Image (tube, grey):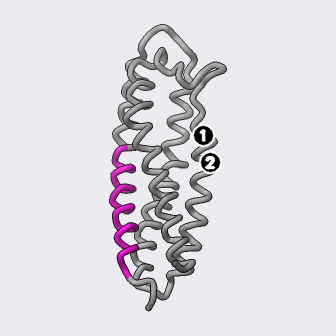
């Protein structure tokens, strides 16, 4: 086991943690949170609100650092194209997250509690979920490519 393999494996684990957390949220959090907003948004409000933000703020920088170290260590190997492909998809996803997903999510969940259902918020939540599933699909595909790169030699 050499540093190329160790960092490659750590990058894979970190990237797969992101995908796992995103998948969990899509099955467990968003269908409930966006079911009857603003009433159903209480999961994000109050003293015991779900706070996913600290996880996301930590995992993304760690994953990016691991990717760049892995890419640097594997630059002169066949693995480079697998890492680059995944890194480009991931960077695009992160940019889209900061441009659309995070601002839209914060806007929706900041809606004050009301014991009613807002059809417009439901529609926005539904669109957010749909687009986020597309983003997650691209991340799944790129994770497969990244893992496939581990089957390639770590030497030139």
Task: Give the percent coordinates (x, y) of residue 154.
Answer: 45, 83
User: In the drawing, does residue 56 fall left or right of residue 115?
Assistant: right
Q: Is residue 117 above or below residue 11?
A: above
- Residue found 44% across the figure and 72% down from its top: 83
Q: Is label 2 in contact with label 1 (beta carbons under 8 Å)?
A: yes
Task: Give the percent coordinates (x, y) of residue 17.
Answer: 48, 51
Location of mark 2 (residue): 57
- Residue found 42% across the figure and 25% down from its top: 34
Which mark, by number, is residue 97?
none
Question: Which portion, as a residue range, is magenta?
Answer: 133-152
Q: Residue furthest bottom?
A: 156
Decide which of 59, 137 is in the foreground and name it.
59
Location of mark 1 (residue): 53
- Residue found 58% across the figure and 52% down from its top: 59
Can you tell which quarter of the image residue 117 is in? top left
Task: Give the percent coordinates (x, y) of residue 94.
Answer: 51, 54
User: In the drawing, does residue 66 fall left or right of residue 133?
Assistant: right
């Amino acid at each position: 086991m050499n540093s190329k393999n160790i960092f490659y494996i750590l990058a894979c684990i970190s990237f797969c943690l992101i995908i796992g957390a995103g998948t969990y949220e899509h099955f467990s959090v968003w269908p409930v949170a966006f079911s009857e907003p603003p009433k159903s948004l209480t999961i994000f409000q109050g003293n015991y609100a779900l706070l996913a933000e600290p996880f996301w703020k930590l995992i993304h920088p760690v994953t990016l650092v691991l990717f760049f170290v892995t890419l640097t260590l594997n630059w002169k190997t066949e693995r480079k194209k697998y890492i680059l492909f995944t890194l480009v998809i991931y960077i695009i996803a992160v940019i889209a997250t900061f441009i659309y997903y995070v601002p839209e999510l914060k806007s929706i969940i900041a809606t004050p509690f009301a014991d009613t259902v807002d059809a417009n918020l439901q529609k926005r939540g539904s669109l957010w979920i749909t687009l986020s599933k597309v983003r997650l699909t691209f991340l799944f595909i790129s994770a497969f490519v990244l893992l496939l790169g581990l089957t390639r030699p770590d030497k030139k």
